[in-house]
Structure formats: structure tokens, C-alpha cells
Image (cartoon, rainbow, N blue to C red):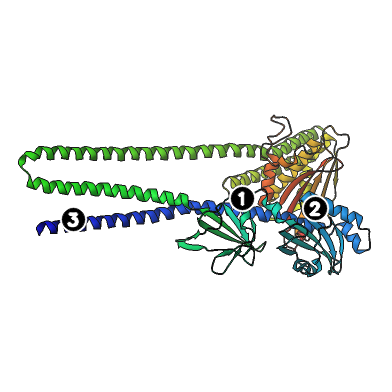
Amino acid sequence: MSWDLLTRSRALWLALTLAFVAALSGSVWHYGYLQALGPLAARGQSDLDLASDRLVSQLQRFREFAVLTTRHPALEALLDGGPRAPADEMLLTAADRTGAVSAFYVAGSGEVLASSGDMVPKDVARSAYFRRALTGALGIAHGEGPGDVDRAFFFAAPNFAPSGEVRGALVVVVDAAVLERDWRGSLPAVFFLDESGTVFVTNRTELLGWRREGDGALVSPSGQRRETETTELGDYTILSQNWSPYIPARALRRVVDLPVIGMTAVLLIDVRPARRYALLQAQAVAAGVLFFVALLWFALERRRALAAINLDLEERVTTRTRDLEEANLALRREVVERQEAEAALKRAQAELVQASKLTALGKMSAGISHELNQPLMAIRSFAENGAAFLERGKPERAAENLGRISDMAGRMGRIIKNLRAFAKAEPGPAHRVGLAAVVEQALELMQRRIETTGATVDWQRPDRPAIVMGGEVRLSQVVVNLISNALDAMQGQEVRRLTLRINHEDAAGMVRLTVRDTGSGIREPDRIFDPFYSTKEVGPEEGMGLGLSISYGIVEGFGGKLRGENLPGGGAQFTLDLRQAGMEITQMEKRA
């Protein structure tokens, strides 16, 4: 009876121990799974944002094409009975360059006046995007395209008459398959659902046309139904499915709404690595606990046996105890070794942080030397002028140059203040600045350089005040850099003409400054804003290839755009677009 009771007691203790180990392993697995899902979700969100931004950016190019081309003179002439051939040729050229499937101009009556080809929808006059364009808004839609295009995006930009009424619209058709071509298979499974829940764009072709039902299941275009199961695990949603062998059977789902194109982006990330990581943690904990439980069980059994055996077993007990002490000592050594390894890892991480700081300091020193170069050259020029005026007996002109030197020193102080703010990642906020005054100030700084090169300056102050949002010192540095680059480009040219113009882009709320030269042009337009890229010879007077890169960053900080291009007749043009300040203009700003 006592033996049966002992057996049942041991069985109960063993069952409780195994239950505890199972519960502990399950908790460790759940915790490890959640911890592993965090980086996986962050990486997936980054991939989803990248795919969404890529699709929106690709479509933005065609949207701008429609908006900017609708007022083209060749299209305007069609409404007055002009010839169609120039408009067709212009639309064909523009469509080829942008990659659009079709571009056609439709009058308000629904008549197609010009097109890039034969791929024009028959019911364009009844389409939702065209009707929206007739209301004065930009029409955007997606669906079946013309010809053999299964999926297409449509952009309809209205054309306004001087009276304000809509006279017609330019429609641009984009093949969705062309947009998918470059990034198909490059990311985890990602697809974009329209308002009806249908997969319209994806990097997995087998998902095209599938529709999400209210119960979460997906239905193929042929009516085939695929059930799905979602599991909420903390802040994460795990989706189980059997749609395709190229899509993970169990995946972490990330979703982001894209109202700008009227779609919802969904990305599925395979959670098998996270599950393997959690399983390894649970197995390691279970093995460790079972190991120590086995040791405890063995010790208890040995103690019971020691109580029943003779004294001649004491030596064996002593030997066994010594073995346990050695095992414990080995475990302690392992703990010490792991602590030392952890300390070494922390030291390596600190060294990596210090190396990163040294790299950033090297880049900043190059930027500071470039930013201070222009004011220093101006101070040198004014000092030489002041000395010349003193020799000629004109102290009042010399005093004027000394005053300008003082202004340049103050300007250098402001530049250093701005650079210090940039180094702290806290640049000064943009404020209202007179762009014309900044241009004239830059021309004044570069006057001696202009005279030395023999260049002719064509500058016309605009009739309207050009008040933009920016920083006077940083904006002046951008204009001076553009003028200096133009003068360098015109060296050795027979005709050296520098043209500066300011225009108001009222529709976009921007003010545009163009700097045009008659130089040799831009050798590699795609690389002009890359850091340390320069076409000049390496040397202390030729620059380090940072000017345009720094200028690009300054303009981006103001919410503007800077771009450069070659002109058809020779030379280059840099265009600076800045946000226009509020419409209220003070008397001081009118003088600017």
C-alpha cells in the first residue's frame, strides 16, 4: 500500500513538473514570438511604405504630365479651329517620353479633338473622370484600359477658359502593368485593393483580380473561393491562407490607406522566421528547466537511496557530490565568459558610434569651408576696392567698401549661426524673404567676378513683389552658388550672357527663379546634385563638388525644388521653385 502511494506521489509530481515546463515553454514561445514580430513588422512597414511611395510617385509623374500639358498652345488652338496634326504629334511625343499608354484631348462636348494614337476609350464622354474634370477638378480613376490594356489609371486635367469655365480636358492613360514591371517580386507579397476590395495592382500576378469578401475570404475572377483566417496577436494581425504557393501560408499583415489614389495597400510577411526564433527560445528554456528538474529528481532519489544503504556508500555519495560541484563551477565559468563577451560587445558598439561621429564631423567640415568661401571672397574683393579708392584719394568710397566688409563679416556670423543650427539638426525656421532683393544682393556680391569674366547680366526686376518663404542668408548662398557655377561654365565661350528671371506660378502657389547661361552645358544632369560630384579640376580654388548638393538640401528645407537642365540651343538653366508667402504684402516688402 505504501509502495503504491509512493508511486502515485511520484507520478503526480512528474505530471505537475511536465505541466509547469509546458506552461513555461508556451509563455516563453508567446513572448519570443511577439518580440520577433516587432522587427519583422517594422521591416514590413518600411517595405510597404516603400512600395506605396513608389506607386504613388510613379502615378504622380503622369498626373503632372496631364496638369502641365493641358494648356499647351497646340491644344489651345484646337478650340479655336486650329489644325489637329501639331496637337497629335505633341501628344504622341509626350506619351512616348513619359511612358503613357495614351493621351487625348477632349472638348467639353465629349468630342476627341487630338490624341497620341488610336487607343481612346469609346465612352470617354460618359466616364466618371471626364465628368469630374468638367467640374474643374482633376479626374482620377482606374479600371479596364483601351485596346489590349487590362488595367489602367486615368488622369483628366481640365482646361479653363479666361472666363473660368471648363472648355475641355486632357486625359492621360497609364498601363498598371508597366508600373509593376520594375518592382515585381522585389518585395514581400504586396497588393493594392480598390474601393470594391479587388486587387488592382500587385507584385504577385496570380492575385490580380481577386476580390475580398465581407467575411475576409478572397474570390478569384473565375469564382474560385479561398478561405482566410485572421488571428490577433497583441498589436499584430496574423493571416492564414492557401491562395498561392508563392505567398506565405501564415503571414503578418500590414495595411496602409492611400487616399491620394483611392486604394488600400496590403503587405504579407512570412512569419516562419519569427516562429522558428520563438520555438528555439522555448526549446532552450524547456531543455534547461528539464535539465535542472532532472538534476533535482536525481538528487532526491539519491538521498532516498542513501537513507536505505549502508555506510559503505558514503564514498560514492561524496564522489557524486564532487561531480555536481564541478558541474556548478563549469556553469559559473560559462556565466563569467558570457558576461565578458557582453562587455566586449558593448565596447565594440561604442567604437562604432564614435566612428560614425568622426565621419559626420568630416562631412560637416567640408560643408563649412564651402559655405564661408563666398563671403570671404567678397570681403577680399571689397578690401581690394577700398585700398584702390584710398590710393585714388576717395576716402568716402573706401569707407563705403569698409562698411560692406563689416556687412559681410556680419553675414559670415549669420552663416556660422545657420551652420551651427544645421549641425544640431535645428535649422532656423523659414520666414518671409524678398526674392528680388536676394538676387540683386547676390549680383552685387559677384559684381567683380562678373566684370573679370566679361559676362553680360540680363536681369529684370519683376513687376510684382516676389515674397517667398525661406532664409535670407541661406537663400543668398544658393543664388550666389548658381551664379558662380554659371560664370565657371561660360569660361572660354564667345558669348557669355547670364539671364535671371522671376515668375509667379499662381496655380501652384510657387515663385520661380531661373538662372540661364550660355556655357558648355551640364555633362551629367542626373548627377549634378550628388555630393562631391564636380566637373572642375581638383584644387583649393575649384571647389569640392558640394555646392549644388548643399544648395539642393537648403531649398528642400524651405519646401521648394531645385533642378538643372540643358537648353536646346546650348547652355544650361537652373530652376529654383519656392513657396510663395501669404498674399498680405507690407510696404517694406513691396520695396523688396
- Tell which circle, 2 or 3, labels the residue nearer the N-terminal end: 3
Query: Residue 116 lies in what quarter of the image?
Result: bottom right
Q: Nearer the viewer, residue 56 or 554?
A: 56
Q: Position of residue 130 (x, y in %)?
A: 78, 67
Question: How packed is label 2: few (under 14 Cα within 10 Å), some, or many (20 or more)?
Answer: many
Q: Secondary structure at mark 3?
A: helix
Give the residue drawn at x 87%, y 52%.
Answer: 89
Residue corresponding to mark 2: 95
Is 158 rendered above or below residue 374?
Answer: below
The amino acid pointed to by label 1 is Pro
Circle 3 residues within 10 Å: few <14, some 14–19, many ≥20: few
Nearest the camera: 13 or 490?
13
Dot 1 lies on which element? Answer: loop
Q: Amino acid at mark 2?
A: Ala
Residue 65 vs residue 302: left or right?
Answer: right
Q: CA distance from mark 1 to mark 2?
A: 41 Å
Q: Which residue is mark 3?
A: 10
Residue 461 visible? The answer is: no
- Can you say whether 297 is above or below 333 in the image? below
Q: Residue at x 84, y 70 (%)?
A: 165
Q: Position of residue 151 (x, y in %)?
A: 71, 59
Q: Are marks 1 and 2 in contact (CB under 8 Å)?
A: no
For discs 2 and 3, the disc positioned in front in the rendered view: 3
User: What amino acid is found at the position of numbered circle 3 in the picture?
Assistant: Arg
Residue where numbered disc 1 is placed: 427
- Could you give the CA–CA distance between mark 1 and mark 3, rounded to whole angstroms? 73 Å
As helix, strand or loop, the secondary structure at mark 2 comes to: helix
The quadrant where residue 320 appears = top left
> Residues under labels 2 and 3: Cα distance?
83 Å
Q: Nearer the viewer, residue 7 or 530?
A: 7
Q: Quarter of the image holding residue 117? A: bottom right
